[in-house]
Amino acid sequence: MKHTYQYPRAALTVDCVVFGFDGGDLQVLLIRRAIPPFKDHWALPGGFVRVEETLDEAARRELVEETGLKDVFLEQLYTFGTIDRDPRERVVSIAYYALVKPADHTTAASTDAAEARWYPINDIPALAFDHATILDIALKRLRGKLTYQPVGFELLPAKFTLTQLQRLYEAVLGTEIDKRNFRKKVLSFDLLIPLKEQLRDGPHRPAQLFRFDPVKYERLKKKGFLFEI
Amino acid sequence: MKHTYQYPRAALTVDCVVFGFDGGDLQVLLIRRAIPPFKDHWALPGGFVRVEETLDEAARRELVEETGLKDVFLEQLYTFGTIDRDPRERVVSIAYYALVKPADHTTAASTDAAEARWYPINDIPALAFDHATILDIALKRLRGKLTYQPVGFELLPAKFTLTQLQRLYEAVLGTEIDKRNFRKKVLSFDLLIPLKEQLRDGPHRPAQLFRFDPVKYERLKKKGFLFEI
DNA sequence: TTGACTTAGTGTCCATCATACACATACAAT
DNA sequence: ATTGTATGTGTATGATGGACACTAAGTCAA
């Protein structure tokens, strides 16, 4: 206890809303808290920011420590600073949201958290602190983001079919989309590269596999291009 | 010096990007720092967050103290937390942006800051800390916001002409807009109430005055309406 | 081998919206 | 009365968004 300041200071934490997609539902990664407060409750992965690391670094570190996830898409969401959001003392939390591909779902429950589990977005348990609010805002942000930036690919495997992409949009936005219009629109951006492979998966016609072209996307972005679905 | 913690803690500040509009240019309110570091440099208004106030409250308090501005449109922007953004020690800053009407421009330089001044967005002096970065991000956010939410009225007097509104959009977006198309679009939302007054202002035809209808806007917003210019 | 089943894949029409574009109007000043 | 200045208005065209139904390619079972 040797860090002393002239005025009282809030503690700083980061919390991460980690989204995943299993082909059907949009999912969120939660951890079960191993220590009080809210011991044994479900919560967003996160923890205290160290004084020698940036906020982004703290978010990535906590993700690794609590869920084993590395190298994911991560963006700052919003900072939550109401007075009583933590029963112990004043805690200000910078919230992030992450998008992870199915291949990264190798989330063996890690050291700091007792357990880590994916929950479908429509079946979330009671959450610790104000994490339900954070999740709510993150979902709204994801919906907005998805409609004007091509981030959906962060939630799909490297090779995917147009139907899988459509299912993802439907799951996130919570709407049904017309197949022909969706394909027309998506392909019109010229950001998907058709592969020589097909996905055969059941007693029906196999589906063309595509991959996202990040290089073309960067070029378009610089020219002030708008991806809008 | 009696506040002691087990681990070192970052100091927490808020910084505000205050936008105004004088009819011609988009302007930003800056203060000249009265104390080190960066003494006598221009900076965004802001200051330390107290442990008993929320982040929003801190931002509003600092605005009053340093610029005299009250009851303005204020939204959180982003949180900046790189290690060396403040030469003294680790400081994490939650940035806000504010939109103020000309009638509120009664910014007698206040207590904490030596001086407060409006600067046109295209003629900003060198700024303290990473405030140039913050301003940059705030401007991008304002541009985005303006095109899909009716926040422009926060920058205009209660009664305004369509030409004034168009000038505002042109100043913020940095583009020219066709007069007829702009008026058609804006009026189509049915959010402007024509007043019985006109603005006569020089040797030419006087202009119809309007006011914004916030009640109708709230109704439309609840029905999932999109304002897009 | 044939037929039944399942998902993949494709094109057109129509309504709506975005954009380009030019001239008459109302006032003040001389 | 004329000039100067900013206000205010409508149309035609091309592009885009949304509704909508059938064929294609494969598996499986009879």
Image (cartoon, coloured by chain):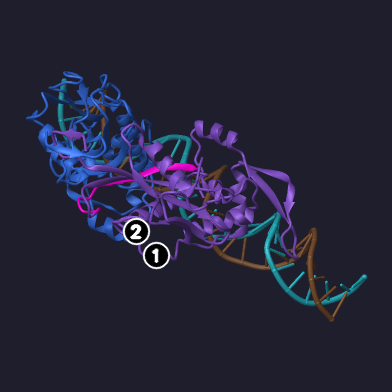
Chain colours: A purple, B blue, C cyan, D brown
Residue A107: numbered disc: none
Mark 1 and mark 2 lie on one chain; the one further toward the N terminus is 1
- Nearer to us in this view, D5 or B130: B130
Which residue, as the protein is rendered here, is positioned at the far front? A1
Q: Is residue C2 above or below residue A103?
A: below
Structural crowding at the residue carrying mark 1, measured as other residues with C-alpha within 10 Å and reported as few (<14), some (14–19) or many (≥20): some
Q: Is residue A196 above or below residue B89?
A: below
Q: Given the image, on which type of amino acid does mark 2 rest?
A: Ala
Report which residue position mark 2 lands on: A132
Distance from the alpha carbon under mark 1 to that under mark 2: 9 Å
Picture coordinates of residue B151, whole percent (x, y): 28, 45
The answer to whether the residue labelled 1 contacts the one labelled 2, judged by CB atoms less than 8 Å apart, is: no
Picture coordinates of residue A207, whole percent (x, y): 71, 55
User: Seen in the image, is B47 located left or right of residue A72?
Assistant: left
Q: Could you tell me which secondary element the residue under label 1 belongs to?
A: loop
User: Seen in the image, is A18 located left or right of residue A5?
Assistant: right
User: For the magenta stretch, what is the residue range?
Assistant: A72-86
Residue A125: numbered disc: 1
Query: Does residue B183 show up?
Result: no
